[in-house]
Image (tube, grey):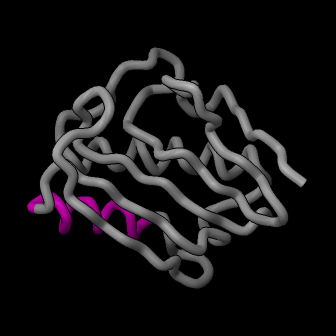
Amino acid sequence: MRKIITTETAPAAIGPYAQANKVNGFVFTSGQVPLDPATGEIVGTTAAEQAVRVMENLRAVLEAAGSGFDQVIKTTVFMKDMNDFAKVNEIYGSYFTDGPLPSRSAVEVARLPKDVLIEIEMIALAG
């Protein structure tokens, strides 16, 4: 069984994709970038500032799917500059205080949508 997840508390998709898919007890989020859900504008000029908005967007998508950070089992973090890893890691880690930590990959990429500094996607249990 598959259900498309959408919420107005996270940025609308900027392409032909869903904010998330809920399938067989799992939630697969699309990558979230640091866009304000109300304005569609980029939030923050540093990777750390952008990471906060990305995580808040992911929180909204997970909650819309009936899940949360305590249910996340795998994340992928895409960064424009791996030199930002420590700052991003500090923000990222502050969202995983309850429950087991997820598995994670972190990679530096040449370019991200809208030239942001960070994008994160998640796979979670559906609550």
Q: Position of residue 33 (x, y in %)?
A: 40, 39
Question: Quick check: is 84 in the magenta stretch?
Answer: yes
- The residue drawn where x is 36% and y is 47% is 119
Location of residue 78 with respect to 125 vertically, above or below: above
- Residue at the extreme top: 39
Question: Quick check: is 87 in the magenta stretch?
Answer: yes
Using the rendered view, name the quadrant where residue 123 is placed: bottom right
- Residue at the extreme bottom: 100
| 37 to the left or right of 46 | right
Q: Position of residue 102 (x, y in %)?
A: 52, 77
Location of residue 106 with respect to 120 vertically, above or below: below
Identify the image quadrant of the C terminus: bottom right
| 16 to the left or right of 4 | left
- The residue drawn where x is 32% and y is 26% is 42
- The residue drawn where x is 65% and y is 65% is 124
| Magenta stretch: dominant secondary structure | helix
Q: Position of residue 11 (x, y in %)?
A: 53, 28
Q: Viewer-proximal residue, 3 or 85?
A: 3
Identify the image quadrant of the N terminus: bottom right
State the extent of the magenta-drawn residues as a range: 83-94
| 73 to the left or right of 104 | right
Q: Viewer-proximal residue, 19 or 85?
A: 19
- The residue drawn where x is 60% and y is 69% is 72
| Labels in figure, total | 0
| 94 to the left or right of 11 | left
